Image (cartoon, rainbow, N blue to C red):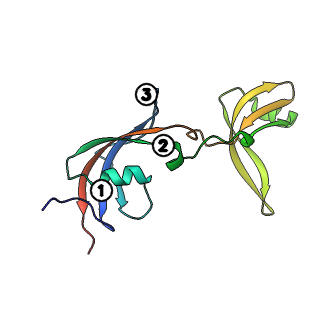
């Protein structure tokens, strides 16, 4: 019988996540692996489907579409704000991630935004997650399977 992960088993993984341009956005090394419960919605579906077919020691590559990861980029999340105080305090530059305060359900919260452009007192920011719209490429190794009781 082949020993592959089943629902509620905990898998021990090492992996590297990269973009199509080769940029690594996340890495979990063998000496500090990730423990994930299968069937717990902790992994994108195509990544979990790949892990479910693996046995200990297997190394696989899987490409996760944006819809299973951080979603497509949403144009409405690009906004131009007119705020000299932000410019004076942060001195934003394109590519910089800044934290902007906003009200959500009556509470003040900070939301990260990527600076796209600065022109005068206007700052164009992008509230999309930095990985939104990207295919995510994973090189995953199954180190261990801890069977559920």
- Residue hosting label 1: 52
Instruction: Describe residue 53's horizontal placement relative to residue 102 as left or right.
Output: left
Work out whether 102 lies above or below 72. below
Quarter holding the N terminus is bottom left
- Residue hosting label 3: 22
Contact, CB < 8 Å: mark 2 with mark 3? Answer: no
Where residue 92 appears, x then y in whole percent?
74, 29
Q: State which tag comes first along the sequence, 2 or 3.
A: 3
The image quadrant that residue 144 belongs to is bottom left
Q: Nearer the viewer, residue 57 or 74?
A: 74
Give the CA separation, mark 2 to mark 3: 16 Å
Identify the residue at horizontal 43%, vertical 28% (top origin): 22
Q: Is residue 11 visible?
A: yes
Badge nearest the viewer, 2 or 3? 2
Identify the residue at horizontal 29%, vertical 56% (top origin): 52
Badge nearest the viewer, 3 or 1? 1
Instruction: Describe residue 17's horizontal placement relative to residue 146 as left or right.
Output: right
- Residue hosting label 2: 65
Instruction: Describe residue 16's horizontal placement relative to residue 132 as left or right.
Output: left
Where residue 66 appears, x then y in whole percent?
52, 43
Identify the residue at horizontal 53%, vertical 47% (top origin): 67
Quarter holding the C terminus is bottom left
Give the CA separation, mark 3 to mark 1: 26 Å
Tell me, for residue 71, which label it has, or none: none
The image quadrant that residue 42 belongs to is bottom left
Identify the residue at horizontal 87%, vertical 29% (top origin): 121
Where residue 91 appears, x then y in whole percent?
76, 29
Q: State which tag comes first along the sequence, 2 or 1.
A: 1
Contact, CB < 8 Å: mark 3 with mark 1? Answer: no
Label 3: how many Cα within 10 Å (few below 14, some 14–19, many 20+): few
């Amino acid at each position: 019988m082949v020993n592959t992960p089943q629902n509620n088993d905990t898998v021990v993984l090492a992996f590297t996540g990269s973009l199509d341009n080769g940029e690594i956005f996340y890495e979990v090394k063998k000496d500090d692996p990730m423990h994930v419960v299968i069937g717990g919605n902790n992994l994108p579906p195509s990544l979990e489907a790949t892990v479910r077919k693996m046995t200990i020691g297997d190394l696989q590559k899987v490409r996760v579409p944006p819809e299973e990861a951080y979603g497509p980029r949403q144009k409405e999340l690009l906004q131009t704000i007119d705020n000299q105080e932000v410019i004076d305090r942060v001195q934003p530059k394109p590519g910089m991630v800044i934290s902007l305060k906003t009200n959500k359900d009556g509470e003040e919260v900070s939301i990260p935004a990527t600076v796209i452009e600065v022109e005068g007192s206007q700052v164009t920011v992008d509230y999309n997650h930095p990985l939104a719209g990207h295919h995510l490429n994973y090189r995953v190794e199954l180190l261990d399977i801890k069977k559920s009781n």
